[in-house]
Image (cartoon, grey):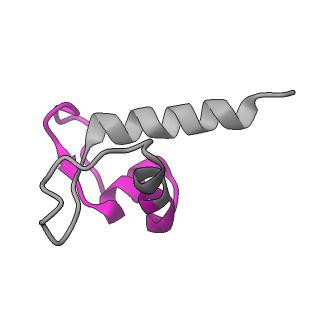
């Protein structure tokens, strides 16, 4: 279970934690990062990427907003 009471600016999540928080699969988090919607907070040389919690929340909200658009 994730702790949403902590400071979202400084909290770093793994891919699995970010996926759980956003309600998506870890593959979607990796896709968001590849497409530039989400940026790694740690060095690219690190084995497991970490994402700032606030960035994950913003990427999820933006994705949901784009999905609601009607053309």
Relative to 46, does residue 35 appear above or below in the rendering? above
Snapshot quadrant of residue 29: bottom left
Residue 41 image point, x, y percent: 19, 46
**Range shown magenta:** 1-30
Q: Is residue 41 left or right of residue 22?
A: left
The residue sitting at 31% across, 58% down in the picture is 17
Q: Classify residue 31 as left or right of residue 9.
A: right
Estimate the x, y position of residue 9 in percent, counting from the top left.
19, 31
Q: Which residue does the image show at 25% across and 60% down from the upper left?
A: 14
Position above or below: 28 against 61: below
- Which residue is at the front of the view, 51 or 18? 51
Q: Residue at x 35, y 54 (%)?
A: 18
Query: Residue 59 location in percent, x, y?
Result: 45, 38
- Locate the C terminus and report the quarter of the image it occupies: top right
Q: Is residue 32 above or below residue 70?
A: below
Residue 32 place in picture, x, y as percent? 47, 51
Residue at image location 24% in from the left, 46% down from the top: 3
């Amino acid at each position: 279970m994730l702790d949403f009471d902590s400071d979202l600016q400084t909290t770093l999540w793994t891919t699995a934690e970010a996926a759980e928080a956003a309600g998506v699969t870890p593959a979607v988090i990796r896709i968001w990062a590849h497409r530039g919607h989400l940026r790694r907070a740690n060095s690219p040389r690190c084995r497991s990427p970490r994402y700032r919690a606030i960035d994950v929340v913003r990427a999820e909200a933006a994705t949901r907003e784009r999905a609601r658009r009607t053309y």
